[in-house]
Structures are given as structure tokens and as C-alpha cells.
Amino acid sequence: MTAPRIASRRRSTSESTIELELNLDGTGQSSIDTSVPFFDHMLTAFAKHSLTDLTVKATGDTHIDAHHTVEDTAIVLGQAIREALGDKAGISRYGDALVPLDEALAQAVVDISGRPFLVHTGEPAGFEFHLIGGHFTGSLVRHVFEAITLNAGLTVHVNVKGGRDPHHIAEAEFKAFARAFRQAKALDPLVAGIPSTKGAL
């Protein structure tokens, strides 16, 4: 019987305090409160579409900027993913998803490789400056993927194929990443041991 793939992490700095729990073998249930409403929406979508149960309670200096709280939460999420994956025995390892949201279309490819690397392309010019929901700037989308990728040890390619509305573009990116991660983390009964010729990931 496979051990539960769960993790619980806490991180506290002068800028933020993050408490996070996840279960990679969940059903997509979530309870998210980061004090940044649009980020709550994105993490809820990630949980739902990756079938990861996720609880997040985060507070921080959002009176200055949402940046610290968002990035620190993503760091902790990445660390928890890495912990919960354990030795990665029996996983599919790779995932690929192409997700539309109305006029927006995003593709994500995930390799649970142990080698952090992010390729993030295709967001339209000016996207990074747009305020989504009044708190979340478009530039934070890339920061979130960078923090998760580096701390979880993932290779991730995210490409925006098209889109006009910043909300739709960001949400398509998060949902594509979630769906690709769902495939990659899945336990495959045909995989014996670690899915790497090196014997480790």
C-alpha cells in the first residue's frame, strides 16, 4: 500500500506568515485565504483541477504590495509538493494540458524531474502591468510559477497561445498547470519504482 502523499508546512518572516497543508491524492477540496482574493481564486482552481486537497492560511504586508504574500505562499506550496512526492516511485512523471478559457488558451507541460526549470512564454505585451481584481498584478503569475518550480523541483513549460482578457489568460495558465501536474503526479500501476534511467528524480 502506498504511503499517504501529504505535507504540512509553515513559514514565517517579517513579511508574511504562511500555513499550508496538502494531499496529492485528494479530490480537489480546498480552503484558501491568502488575503489576496484573485490569488485565492487561482489556488482554488489549482486544487480543483489537479485533484489536490489544499488548505492555505496566509497573512502578510499586503498594505505595501501583494507580492511578498503571493510569492511566499508559492514557495511554501512548492516545498510541500516536493515533500509530499517523496521518492516519486510509481508516478507517471510527465503531464501535458491545453486549456481554454473563453478567448484565452494556455498550454502547460510538467516533468517531475528533480531539476527546477521554468520556460514561461506568450503573455501579451503589457500583461505584467495589469491589475487583476485590484490586488494581483499580471507579473505575479510568472513569480508564482517560478517559486513553485524552484521549490518543488519541477521542469515546467507554460505557453499562452492566445487571449485578450488578463483574468482569462491568468486563469487558463493556472488551470493548464494544474491539469498537467495532475497527470504527472498520478500513480501509474505500470510504473515499477522510479521512472528514470538514473534511478532517482
Image (tube, rainbow, N blue to C red):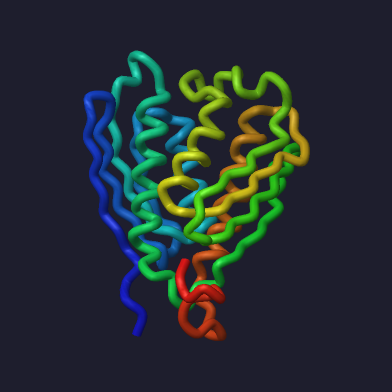
Percent position of residue 71, x then y: 41, 33
Q: Which residue is drawn at 46% across and 54% down?
A: 153
191 over 69 or under it: above or below: below
Residue 98 is situated, as x and y percent measured from the top left of the image, at 71, 53
Q: In this view, does 4 lie to the left or right of 159?
A: left
With respect to residue 122, does 26 lie above or below? below
Quarter of the rendering containing residue 36: top left
- Is residue 161 shown above or below 127? below
Q: In which quarter of the image is the N terminus?
A: bottom left
Q: In which quarter of the image is residue 14?
A: top left
- Furthest toward the top, the residue is 64
The number of discs equals 0
The residue sitting at 56% across, 85% down in the picture is 190
Residue at 35%, 20% in the rendered image:
62
Q: Is residue 84 left or right of residue 91?
A: left
Residue 174: give x, y in percent of width and height. Answer: 57, 44
Q: Where is residue 11 in the image (x, y as percent from the top left)?
A: 25, 40
Left or right: residue 114 compared with residue 72: right
Residue drawn at (51%, 58%) of the image: 50
Q: Nearer the viewer, residue 6 or 28?
A: 6
As drawn, 70 above or below 29: above
